[in-house]
Image (cartoon, helix red, strand yellow):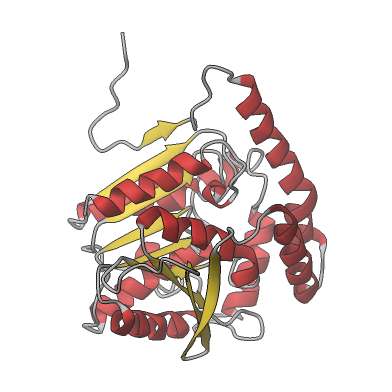
């Protein structure tokens, strides 16, 4: 007899492993191994953040690239954030096509167009529009609340540029930032996006989720040690429970519809599950999609089984607004 999950429960996806289940499983396992020996090792062991940035940029550049026919064009600045419009070189979408304001992950200390530009092009193609990429200022050079200030300014710019539907998306720290920006925008009576798309968001900088311990052995990218380092660089002594840094604790829970995509194996799993519960209690429409055995922010890795499916879910979420 088929098992039917309870109403409101996240659906658990495997990424589609039939009929040749072993090959996607092997590819996923190899991705976990590669990430443990590279990115996770750098985050945990390399003392210099600038060196981590250079290594990460080179690493992503060897495994991912801007799709042919796409480009990132400078689109000005928003406070301290450099903005880039990611769109096709030809066949430019009409002015009223969807615009996605995107905040990248990287623990507030690494990441940028070099690490996320190719994924954002795939995202733009999926939604049939463009991405406004916000390359916000990073810590420790620019600690909290610089990223939030840049994010709010980026939302103002995006609201001006958008002639059609506007969405906000982000992964990991960028997902937490996207959420914090929308909550701050509500408090300031600013224009809001139609929907939020959050990929494995880091919403709790107090690191209080039970999955921080339960999934310590299965997360191939992050750990309590790594997140503590990132948090220290970003907050520079500020209180981690501040709702502007940890939007999980913000009372503004009646938001535009939210799509949450995450892995059941990552240490930040409970940042998503608790957020979904809080938002639903506040009256927000939330769609959750949990994948088994995938790396943190797996939709960004185009070779990982399930990444394409996750992008299709985003496209369906946007088209069914």
Q: Is residue 155 left or right of residue 74?
A: left
Q: Is residue 265 above or below residue 129?
A: above
Q: Position of residue 202 (x, y in %)?
A: 49, 60
Left or right of 276? Residue 189 is left
Q: Is residue 158 above or below residue 169?
A: below
Residue visible at 72% across and 36% down in the picture: 30
**Above or below, comparing residue 107 to residue 29 in the picture:** below
Q: Is residue 28 in view?
A: yes
> Looking at the image, which residue sits at the far front?
90
Identify whether 33 is placed above or below 318. above
**Quarter that holds the N terminus:** top left
**Residue 23: x, y in percent?**
65, 24
Query: In the image, residue 236 lies at what x, y percent?
Result: 61, 81
Q: Quadrant of the C terminus?
A: bottom left
- Furthest residue toward left: 283
Query: Which residue is at 60% across, 62% downward?
Result: 66
* Residue 278 visible in image: no
Q: Position of residue 9 (x, y in %)?
A: 30, 36
Q: In the picture, residue 279 is in which quadrant?
A: bottom left
Residue at figure coordinates x 65%, y 75% from the top left: 233
Residue shown at 50% from the left, 61% from the top: 121
Label tally: 0
What is the residue that sits farthest to the top in this orientation?
A: 1
In this view, the residue in front, 126 or 15, is 126
């Amino acid at each position: 007899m088929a098992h039917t999950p309870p109403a409101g429960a996240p659906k658990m996806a495997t990424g589609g492993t039939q009929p040749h289940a072993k090959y996607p499983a092997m590819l996923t396992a190899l991705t976990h191994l590669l990430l443990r020996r590279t990115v996770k090792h750098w985050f945990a062991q390399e003392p210099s953040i600038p060196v981590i940035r250079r290594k990460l940029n080179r690493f992503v550049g060897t495994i991912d690239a801007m799709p042919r026919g796409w480009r990132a064009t400078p689109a000005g600045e928003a406070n301290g954030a450099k903005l880039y419009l990611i769109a096709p070189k030809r066949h430019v979408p009409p002015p009223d096509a969807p615009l996605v304001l995107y905040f990248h992950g990287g623990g507030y200390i690494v990441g940028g167009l070099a690490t996320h530009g190719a994924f954002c092009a795939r995202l733009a193609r999926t939604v049939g529009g463009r991405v406004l990429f916000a390359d916000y200022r990073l810590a420790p050079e620019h600690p909290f609340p610089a990223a939030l200030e840049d994010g709010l300014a980026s939302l103002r710019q995006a609201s001006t540029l958008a002639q059609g539907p506007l969405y906000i998306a982000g992964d990991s720290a960028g997902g937490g930032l996207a959420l914090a920006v929308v909550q701050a925008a509500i408090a300031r009576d600013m224009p809001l996006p139609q929907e939020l798309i959050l990929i494995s968001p880091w919403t709790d900088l107090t690191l209080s989720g039970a999955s921080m311990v339960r999934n310590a052995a299965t997360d191939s990218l992050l750990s309590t040690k790594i997140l503590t380092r990132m948090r220290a660089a970003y907050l520079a002594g500020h209180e981690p429970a501040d709702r502007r840094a940890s939007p999980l604790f913000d009372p503004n829970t009646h938001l535009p519809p939210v799509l949450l995509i995450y892995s059941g194996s990552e240490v930040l799993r409970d940042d998503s599950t608790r957020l979904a519960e809080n938002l639903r209690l506040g009256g927000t429409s939330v769609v959750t999609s949990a994948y088994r055995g995938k790396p943190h922010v797996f939709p960004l890795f185009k070779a990982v089984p399930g990444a394409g499916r996750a992008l299709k879910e985003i496209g369906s979420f946007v088209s069914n607004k």
